[in-house]
Image: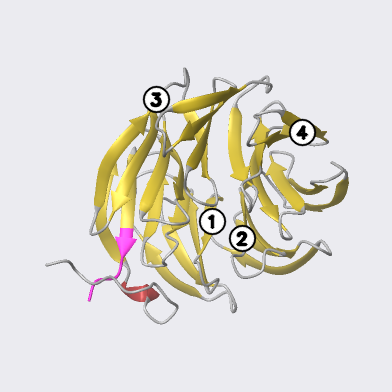
Amino acid sequence: MPVDHPVISPENANSLREIDQAGRGWITTARWSPVSQALAVAASTGVALYEVHDGLKLRAVLEGHSGPVKGVAVNHDGTKIASSSADTTIRLWDLKQGGQYRVLVGHTDSVDGLAFSPNGDYLASVSADRTVRVWDARTAGVVRVLEGHQDEVQAVTFCDDGRLIASGGRDATIRFWCLDTGAQERLVRHDDWVRELIASPLDDRLLASVSRDMTLRLWDVTQGVQRMMLRTHFNGVDSVSFSPDGRLLATGGRDNTVKIWDSATGQALQSLEGHQKPVLTVAFSPDGRWLASGSGDNSVRLWGIST
């Protein structure tokens, strides 16, 4: 009989426990389909697609890159996946028709991060070549190349109803670019390498960022004002995710733990142990019942609450 797994909330976050785990090589990114219980995991060996009910069930592996896969993104209706790699390419996969249907070429170094726009029309990519590229997700053409970062760029997301692209990287800056014009509108700073960015699902004018400076910060993207700063993981923070109702934040860090935070108060609610190396990705499921984490220990782990 299936086990009931309630939505993870501030009231029950201290009851989170590991439900399942799977080995997949060096895990860099995990992203859920917005419309189903499907999880895409980028690892050294390709992109693994899992179906999640009471555990992780491997459904397919997308292979084709000639180097480690560094990033993965799923579009708004769950029909397309983009993957990026140290081989400098981005590959687009059609989950309805099956298989790869586009290879995007243009970056000159490892492509470390990806994000689809909210409507799925655009794909943003960031690279060790210090650029942000914006692609037309339908034609695979380059819309524009955004330059300004002084070192490798690793993190990217859309915010402010898709009007802005936020990017962050080794130069310790977060830069906000206008999608329509390509102009840089503002810049904010951490004290070290910016590792990941994510907008709030309730109001995407609120952006969460994490850094090697050991902090999680919340920003008002329209004004470039810091709203909150939390000291989180010893030696640095690598990953962050909002719960779908925006009430929780999960972070993964260099201390090999996953931590859960109340996004309104900044209160630490839970620390999850089990990974043996830095936690490079965390992601809440769209229904709020699951939290996935992936690590350099070659495992992806599934956390939930059982009743």
Can residue 24 be seen at all in this image of the molecule?
no
Point out which mark residue 240 bears. Answer: 1
Tag nearer the camera, 1 or 3:
3
Tag nearer the camera, 2 or 3:
3
How far apart are the two marked residues, 1 and 2, measured between alpha carbons? 8 Å
Quarter residue 111 falls in: top right
Residue 61 location, x and y as percent? 34, 32
Label 1: how many Cα within 10 Å (few below 14, some 14–19, many 20+): many
- Does residue 184 appear left or right of residue 247 in this picture? right
- Whether the residues at callouts 1 and 2 have beta carbons within 8 Å, the answer is yes
Q: Secondary structure at mark 2?
A: strand
Label 2: how many Cα within 10 Å (few below 14, some 14–19, many 20+): many
How far apart are the two marked residues, 4 and 2, measured between alpha carbons? 31 Å
Q: Is residue 135 above or below residue 66?
A: below
Type of residue at label 4? Val
Judge by depth and name the residue closer to the eye, 32 or 97.
Answer: 97
Judge by depth and name the residue closer to the eye, 50 or 69.
Answer: 50
- Residue with the mark numbered 2: 216
How far apart are the two marked residues, 3 and 4, measured between alpha carbons? 27 Å
- Does residue 48 appear left or right of residue 128 in this picture? left
Judge by depth and name the residue closer to the eye, 226 or 50.
Answer: 50
Of the two numbered discs 1 and 2 on the same chain, state the one appearing first in sequence: 2
Q: Is residue 7 magenta?
A: no
Q: Secondary structure at mark 3?
A: loop
Point out which mark residue 83 bears. Answer: none
- Residue with the mark numbered 4: 143
